[in-house]
Image (cartoon, helix red, strand yellow):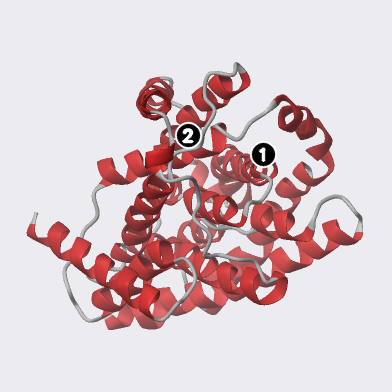
């Protein structure tokens, strides 16, 4: 409990410093950076999975509430770019596995699951079952999410001059209490039902689906208020930064350094794919960058909400990426390394 309280304080200091320096996304990036610095200084920290999942459900409701029949119909036209997702996942694997294995000396299982741009918990579970180094996997994926989430706002602001200071929603005081109650129920019921059904990403996708249904039926008319989305950013950012708690200098020299090099590869590949899609006239460049950037699903949702991107486009591509990785990773790992068959 003490470590959790300390983590909250550190994350809050990060928000304050980012606000003071007028840096982008203080509620998300401030806690990430502050907790990372504290972890490297040896401060013991921890996150709260239940609270983090609850915050992710807020983002699910926020995305679902934006759905209209027009947006739903537009998803049919996304198939050319959706087909690029498995291609990009395969390309990341073909480059990432040799990178981790030959340059950094990781074993095959660790290299494979470090390279796969899936969810942290899924890659840790698969990697552990395959005999990989769980600590290395945790640090690599935490670094991947952190670098992508920290780099993208500066890219969006510098290249497209996107205003990241706008509130991500209306103030709670302007939304009818009945609508707020519906949002809470969407989050709780959608999350628990999706979890009971064994749906991956249940804390986001369950509320998203239920909120989308109610929005399409004309029952839900608002996204969660700005205060709720700021709170979600705070806890999600804190969780990303706190994953570095207990990191040692040998781990920084090997695992984190390997992850930073891989992040450069990922960002270059994302830009290449985004440019190809843009030149082909398949999608707007900003939405494409957000849809193909291999960050965490929750973190990319936050960015898309803040910049006012096409939520259906961005989320559809991230859900497909996670789906491809979760279904394909164990099968591909055995094909590429037959010795694991036994």
Rendered image: mark on residue 312: 1
Can the viewer see residue 264 in this picture? yes
- Across and down, in percent, residue 86 comes to 71, 46
Q: Nearer the viewer, residue 264 or 133?
A: 264
Residue for point 60% across, 66% down = 163
Side of 162 where 305 appears, left or right: left
Q: Nearer the viewer, residue 301 or 107?
A: 301
How far separated are the C-alphas under marks 2 and 1?
A: 13 Å
Residue for point 19% across, 66% down = 9
Secondary structure beneath dot 1 equals helix
Secondary structure beneath dot 2 equals helix
Instruction: Name the quadrant containing residue 91.
Output: bottom right
Rendered image: mark on residue 134: none
Q: How many marks?
A: 2
Q: Residue furthest top?
A: 217
Q: Residue furthest right?
A: 280
The mark nearer the N terminus, 2 or 1, is 2
Can the viewer see residue 129 in this picture? no
- Across and down, in percent, residue 94 comes to 68, 61
**Where is 9 relative to 182, above or below?**
below
Residue for point 72% across, 28% down = 72
Residue for point 54% across, 58% down = 295
Dividing the image into 4 quarters, which one contains the N terminus?
A: bottom left
> 10 Å neighbourhood of mark 1: few (<14), some, or many (≥20)?
many
**Where is 82 relative to 74, above or below?**
below
Rendered image: mark on residue 61: 2
Side of 93 where 244 appears, left or right: left
Instruction: Name the quadrant containing residue 125.
Output: top left
- Across and down, in percent, residue 102 comes to 57, 75
**Where is 281 relative to 215, above or below?**
below
Side of 307 where 281 appears, left or right: right
- Across and down, in percent, residue 14 comes to 31, 72
């Amino acid at each position: 409990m003490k470590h959790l309280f300390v983590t909250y304080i550190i994350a809050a200091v990060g928000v304050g410093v980012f606000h003071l320096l007028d840096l982008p996304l203080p509620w998300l990036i401030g806690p990430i950076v502050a907790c990372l610095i504290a972890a490297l200084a040896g401060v013991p920290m921890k996150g709260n999975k239940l609270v983090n999942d609850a915050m992710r459900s807020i983002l699910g409701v926020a995305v679902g509430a934006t759905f209209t029949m027009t947006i739903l119909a537009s998803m049919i036209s996304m198939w050319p770019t959706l087909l690029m997702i498995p291609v990009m996942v395969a390309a990341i694997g073909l480059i990432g596995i040799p990178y981790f294995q030959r340059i950094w000396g990781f074993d095959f299982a660790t290299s494979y699951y470090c390279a796969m741009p899936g969810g942290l918990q899924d890659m840790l579970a698969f990697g552990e079952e395959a005999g990989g180094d769980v600590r290395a996997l945790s640090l690599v994926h935490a670094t991947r999410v952190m670098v992508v989430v920290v780099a993208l706002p500066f890219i969006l602001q510098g290249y497209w001059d996107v205003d990241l200071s706008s509130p991500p929603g209306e103030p709670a005081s302007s939304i009818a209490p009945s609508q707020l109650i519906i949002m809470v129920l969407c989050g709780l019921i959608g999350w628990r039902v999706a979890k009971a059904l064994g749906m991956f990403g249940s804390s986001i996708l369950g509320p998203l689906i239920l909120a989308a249904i109610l929005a399409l039926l004309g029952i839900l008319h608002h996204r969660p208020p700005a205060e709720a989305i700021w709170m979600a950013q705070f806890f999600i950012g804190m969780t990303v930064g706190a994953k570095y708690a207990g990191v040692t200098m040998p781990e920084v020299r090997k695992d984190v350094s390997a992850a930073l090099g891989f992040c450069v590869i990922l960002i270059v590949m994302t830009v290449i794919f985004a440019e190809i899609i843009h030149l082909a006239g398949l999608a707007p460049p900003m939405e494409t960058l957000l849809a193909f950037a291999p960050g965490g699903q929750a973190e990319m949702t936050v960015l898309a909400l803040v910049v006012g991107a096409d939520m259906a486009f961005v989320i559809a591509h991230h859900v497909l990426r996670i789906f491809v990785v979760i279904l394909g990773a164990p099968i591909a790992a055995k094909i590429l390394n037959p010795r694991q068959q036994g």
